[in-house]
Amino acid sequence: MCGRDPWASRDPAVPAASPAGDRGKGERAGSGQPSSRLAAPRDAADLHLSPHVTVLEALGYALSQLLQAKEAPEKIIPSVLGSTLPQHMLQLLQPGPKLNFGVAVEFAWCLHYITCSQVNNALLITHGALSTLGLLLLDLAGAVQRTEDAGLELLACPVLRCLSNLLTEAAVGAVGEQMQLRDERVVAALFILLQFFLQKQPSLLPEGLWLLNNLTANSPSFCTSLLSLDLIEPLLQLLPVSNVVSLLVLTVLCNVAEKGPAYCQHLWPGPLLCSLLGTLAFSDTEVVGQSLELLQLLFLYRPEAAQAFLQQSGLQALERHEKEAQLQDRVHALQQTALHS
C-alpha cells in the first residue's frame, strides 16, 4: 500500500457511541484532519484514472490525504463531487475479478472521508453507492470464509463506515431497494464479519455494530431479518468484549424491542433477561442506562418478563444504582414498572 501502514494515519478506533437512549442513525466520524499542502485541482473532472494499478493506488492515497485537509469540506469535496471522480471510485469498488485490493482500500477511504463531510451524501446514493458498497460487503464476507487472514479488515473498515454514514441520508423505506439486496443477505454478511473481527481484529467490532444499528434503527424489515436468522444469541455473546461494544449491542436490541410486541416475543423467553441482569452489574453508566431502557421496553410489551425479572433478584440488581444521579430516575421508573406489571 504505497510502502506504508494504512493504520498509521487512519485510526480504526471508534469514536464514542451515541448516548444511552439515543438510537437514531448516527454518523461515523473520520480520523483527524492533518494539514495538507496539496491543492484542489482546478477542475476535478479533468482527472483521468490511470489503468496502471500502482498509479491508481498512489492516486487514491494522495486523494485521501487531500480529502482530510481542513479546508476539504468547503473547497475540495464539493469540487470532487461535482466531477466524475465519485463514479470512477465506485467502479473501482465493484466486486469481481477486476477488483484490486490495494486500489479498493485507498478509494474506500476516499469515500469514507467524503461521507464524513456530509457535503452531499445524497448524491453518492444516486450514483449507486449503497448498492456498490452493499455488494462489496457481501464479497468481503465471502472472502473471510475462504481465507485465514489476508488483511481484509483494511478494506472492511472504510466500507462499513461509508455504509453507516450513507444510511443516515437514505430514506428508510428505500434502503433495501437502493442496496438492491435482500435484508437477510446483508445481515448475515455483517455477522460473518463480526465473527471475523472477534477473532482477528476486535477493535473493528464497533464498526460493524454501528452499521447494524443504522440498519435496524427505523427498519422493521432488518429487525425481522435479525430475528429470523436467530442472531440474538450471537449478538449477546459480544456483550463482554468492551463497554463500547456492549452499548452498541444493547442499542441494536432496543431498536428491535421498540418495534412492538411481535418483536419482543422473540426476545423473551430466551437468554436476554439473564444477559441484562449481567449488564446491570457493569460500572459504566451508559451501558447500565441502555440496559434499563431495554428492560423498560421489554416489560412494556412482555409483562411476563417483569415477573421473571423479579424472581431472578432483579430489584436487588437495580438497588445498586439508586443513588447514581444519571440513573436514579430511570431505576425508579423501572422498579415501578416491574412491580406493577
Image (tube, grey):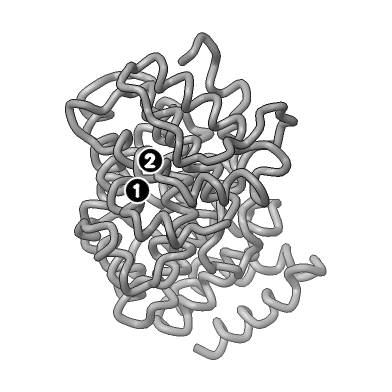
- Front residue (pair 222, 128): 128
Residue 341, horizontal then vertical, whole percent: 49, 88
- Front residue (pair 129, 162): 129
**Seen from this angle, which residue lies furthest bottom?**
340
Left or right side of 144 for 58: right
Question: Residue visible at 57% across and 51% down?
Answer: 78
Q: Which of marks 1 and 2 is in front?
A: 2
Question: Residue visible at 67% across and 51% down?
Answer: 74
Q: Are marks 1 and 2 in contact (CB under 8 Å)?
A: yes
Q: Which amino acid does label 1 sit on?
A: Pro
Q: Residue 234 carries which label?
A: 1
Q: Residue 194 carries which label?
A: 2
Number of marks: 2
Residue 266 to residue 128: above or below: below
Residue 225 to residue 109: above or below: below
Question: Residue visible at 70% across and 51% down?
Answer: 283
Residue 94, horizontal then vertical, whole percent: 26, 38
Label 1 Cα neighbours within 10 Å, binned few <14 / some 14-19 / many ≥20: few
Disc 1, SS: helix
Left or right side of 227 for 251: right
